[in-house]
Amino acid sequence: MTPAAGRGRPGRARPSAEPAGLAELRGWLRARKTATKHADGKPATFQDLADRTHAGNKEERERYGVSACTLRQTLGGRLPTLRTVLAFTYSTGGTFEDLAKAEQMWTAAERAAHPPPRKRPAPYVPGRFTTPDGLVRAMDGVRATAPRTGLRTLAGRAGLSVSTLRRILIGRRTPTAEELAAFAGACDAGAKATAALMDGHQRILAGPSRPMPHPYAAAASRGPARSGLRGPALAN
């Protein structure tokens, strides 16, 4: 039985699009190969191009000599080396200007294929909080600047179940000190942020502080002070 139309082969992932810089470089190299022909007008093969890289003087052979297979792989797969790109350009009759352009395009392709890692923002340090809602907001801020913010990833790094961490983050459950410290460690929060979380957590557990009574108010609540002196005796 043949597979239904429109269905792809099972188990085979579709190739991802290559970076624009790399696609531009390969398009430029393909165009150069297409334009390279024999004296009789026939298009040059990869073997013809490889033979050209070995036909120059000793210095040129050492600098550009490659195989037909290497040249073929330049047009597909991973990013080719700069030496291979220069050899491809040389084999298609490249001038010094062409070689300089090839190097410039390869540099752009290499930058597109291997972009620098995204710079992590500075870890968020929560301000003072005294309520469970404040704790939830503080944890959200710490999570937002973590290098890995996925719930399942953080739960695994913290040694918590996904359901437990989800309930903590939405305020359905107050974490223990151990769970909060594990969360901070999973977020790579740093010493200051961790200390701010733990201090606020301790304030929540301790409850709201009671204001100290004013000394005059305390004295008034006890009534007038009694003097040890007796007043004058009443006349009979």
Image (cartoon, rainbow, N blue to C red):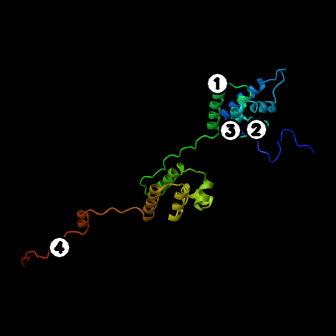
Q: Are marks 1 and 3 in contact (CB under 8 Å)?
A: no
Q: Return the residue found at the far right.
A: 1
Q: Amino acid at mark 4?
A: Arg
Q: Residues within 10 Å of mark 3 (few under 14, many from 20)?
A: few
Q: Residues within 10 Å of mark 4 (few under 14, many from 20)?
A: few
Residue bearing mark 3: 81
Q: Amino acid at mark 2?
A: Thr
Residue 174 in sight: no
Sequence order check, earlier mark of 1 and 4: 1
Q: Nearer the viewer, residue 139 or 108?
A: 108
Q: Nearer the viewer, mark 1 or mark 4?
A: 1
Q: Return the residue found at the far front.
A: 58
In the rendered image, residue 128, in percent from the top left (x then y), is placed at: 41, 54
Residue bearing mark 1: 97
Q: Which mark is residue 70?
A: 2
Distance from the alpha carbon under mark 1 to that under mark 3:
19 Å
Task: Tell me: residue 174, above or below residue 119.
Answer: below
Q: Which mark is residue 226?
A: 4
